[in-house]
Amino acid sequence: MKRSIVSIAALFVFATTAMAQVEQPSQITIQGTGLLTKDTFDSNSEHSTKSGGLLVGYSYQFNKWAGVEGNYGYTRNTQNYFGLTGRSSIQSDIHEVTGSFVAHIPVNVARVRPYLLAGAGAVVFDPTDKVTVNGAARQTKAAFVYGGGVNFDLTHNFGVRAEYRGLAFKVPDYTLDSLHIDKLTHIAQPSVGFFFRF
């Protein structure tokens, strides 16, 4: 019992100290993104069309160098599969939900705040009515996310963010054995947008 109380007290002191170190610890971001997916080859091959999308996020900075961030992204593109059964195309709404640890890199340049991030999440593939293969179902794939970027402060609480994110996950097969490719693929996701600090 004493150990639990001491731990909670230490956590409270740490959190209070961490909050005191960052004047505006919260940040909301809105970014336009590009999605460039790596082609995958096996007995089947898969190629995704390039697309643009939206990425929104919230981050909290514990101290000068550490924070966390949660993001939601949306885009729509088409996965094209080529194999022994011929060609199949599935257009999907793609939802990306990720959480990351953010390491802030100290630099001696005014109004420039670079950072690196790494984390995990999920990519959800939700087929639209433009499907050339029957039975395609919504599918969620676990993802690893990494990247980095720079926040450019234009005012005290508003600025521009430029970022690169990479997501690695298993190729979706929409629960169809005929489309199954047991390999990882990668999305390169450059983005630019705005942030609001408070």
Image (cartoon, helix red, strand yellow):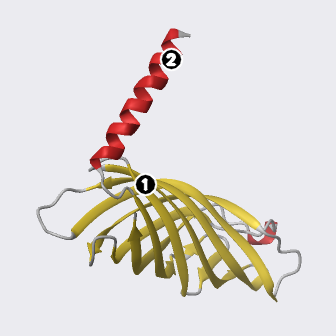
Q: Which mark is residue 43?
A: none
Quadrant for residue 164, please give it: bottom left
Between 176 and 16, the residue placed more toward the observer is 16
Q: Is residue 21 above or below residue 94?
A: above
* Neighbourhood count class around disc 1 (C-alpha, 10 Å): few under 14, some 14–19, many 20 upward: many
Where residue 78 appears, as percent x and y from the top left, is 66, 85
Q: Are marks 2 and 1 in contact (CB under 8 Å)?
A: no
Q: Is residue 111 left or right of residue 141?
A: left
Give the position of the N terminus as an image quadrant. Answer: top right
Q: What amino acid is found at the position of numbered circle 2 in the picture?
A: Ile
Q: Is residue 41 above or below residue 70?
A: below
Which residue, as the protein is rendered here, is positioned at the far left? Answer: 108
Residue at position x 27%, y 73% from top? 153
Between 152 and 16, the residue placed more toward the observer is 16
Residue at position x 38%, y 30% from top? 13
For disc 2, the marked residue is 5
Mark-to-mark CA distance, 2 and 1 = 25 Å
Quadrant for residue 60, please give it: bottom left
Q: Is residue 136 left or right of residue 64?
A: right
Residue at position x 19%, y 56% from top? 106
Q: What amino acid is found at the position of numbered circle 1 in the picture?
A: Tyr
Give the position of the C terminus as an image quadrant. Answer: bottom left
Q: Which mark is residue 60?
A: 1
Give the structural element (helix, strand or loop) at label 2: helix
Give the structural element (helix, strand or loop) at label 1: strand
